[in-house]
Image (cartoon, grey):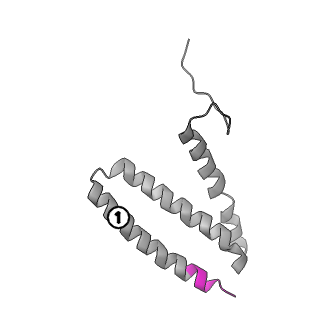
Amino acid sequence: MRGHRQLCGLRNGCSGSERTGLFRRITAAPPLPCLLISKVFSTFPPYILIFRHINVGIEEIMADHVHQGMTRNWIVIYLGSFLFIVIKDVFLSSAP
């Protein structure tokens, strides 16, 4: 019998990482058209989803490729402060 990978949406047969990956893909795609179409304050939830998706993605990449724990922590701190500045600028520029 050949080994094969079962494709399963959000069924119980999926592992937690497969479910999490699918959830990230679902939450990453819808906000992009909203950001391109309108620049009003109603885009607040999509901004939150996009920044959260960026942060989680970069942390996963660092967990895979940066093996020194202290370096990874410093990068997370600097990334968090950079994203805080970007989020502040985005929200202040889109305020009514």
80 or 35, nearer to the observer: 80
Q: Position of residue 68 (x, y in %)?
A: 27, 53
Give the labeled residue for mark 1: 75
2 to the left or right of 80 = right
Quadrant for the N terminus in the image: top right
Quadrant in which residue 79 is drawn:
bottom left
Residue 95 at x, y = what percent?
66, 85
Span of residues in magenta: 90-96
Q: Is residue 41 magenta?
A: no
Please state if 81 lies on the left or on the right of 25 as rendered.
Answer: left
What amino acid is labelled 1 in the image? Ile
* Quarter occupied by residue 3: top right
Q: Residue at x 62, y 70 (%)?
A: 47
Q: How many marks?
A: 1
Seen as rendered, the residue at the extreme top is: 1
* Residue depicted at x 33% and y 58%: 72
One can see residue 39 in this view: no
**Residue 64 pos. (x, y %):** 38, 47
Residue at 49%, 57% (x, y): give it.
Answer: 56
Answer above or below: position of 46 versus 40: above
Identify the element where label 1 is drawn: helix
